Amino acid sequence: MRIAVLALQGAFAEHEQMLRRLGVGAFEVRQLANWNQPKNGLIIPGGESTTQGKLLHDLGLFEPIRQAITEGLPVLGTCAGLILLSPMHLGTMDIDVERNAYGRQLGSFYTEAPVEGIAGNVPMTFIRAPYINKVLSSDVQVLAKVDSHIVAARQGRQLVTAFHPELDFDTRIHELFLSLAR
Ligand code: GLN
């Protein structure tokens, strides 16, 4: 099992750390040559979706990644990663996304809430986070809501969270993703 971690910008190191804790191999994708290695899944980290989106285009990674996801490559998108999978960028996930949805001042907060398929509450760290305004297809399964806003969802092998599971000790969001990749 080997997971590609998009490492152009943002919180990719924390995802790699999480995969190490789970005993799963990972490699960084910084350019097209890295991408062309065998992989069982992809993580698109939080950071700045505009920057990551531009770099994906500049490096020629946009289309190969979009195509791989369309063909069923499992993907975990967190925060900016969620935005990148939405129709604003790669468009592989049928979700309508509100960027910086919590405002810029009170944009960062911590809470705990249930996630479908995981027992008990999951820690959720939000940093200038988006949320999902609405799902655009019945293929999208809502996994979690906070204050009535959708903050986690799944569509086939695509899993997205508006929060940063890689910043908390709980490994279960990553385990859920790995179960899609197995
Ligand atoms: N605000 C960022 C964006 O719009 C996302 C923030 C994050 O990934 N922590 O891309």
Image (tube, rainbow, N blue to C red):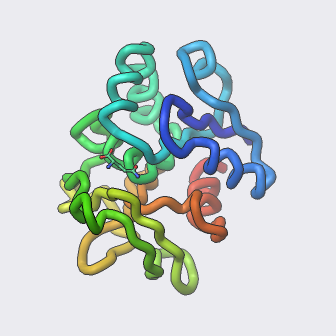
Query: For the N terminus, which image quadrant?
Result: top right
Q: Is 55 displayed left or right of 99 in the figure?
A: right
Task: State the residue in front, 117 or 151.
Answer: 151
Task: State the residue in front, 35 or 170.
Answer: 170
Q: Position of residue 55 (x, y in %)?
A: 40, 22
Q: Position of residue 170 (x, y in %)?
A: 64, 70
Can residue 18 be seen here? yes
Q: Position of residue 3 (x, y in %)?
A: 65, 39
When asked about the image quadrant of residue 145, the answer is: bottom left
Q: Position of residue 122 (x, y in %)?
A: 53, 77
Q: Is 162 displayed left or right of 88 in the figure?
A: right
Can residue 132 be seen here? no
Residue drawn at 62 percent across, 20 percent down: 34
Task: State the residue in front, 41 or 32.
Answer: 32
Q: Is 148 displayed left or right of 124 in the figure?
A: left
Q: In the picture shown, does residue 182 fall above or below 55? A: below
Task: State the residue in front, 38 or 125.
Answer: 125
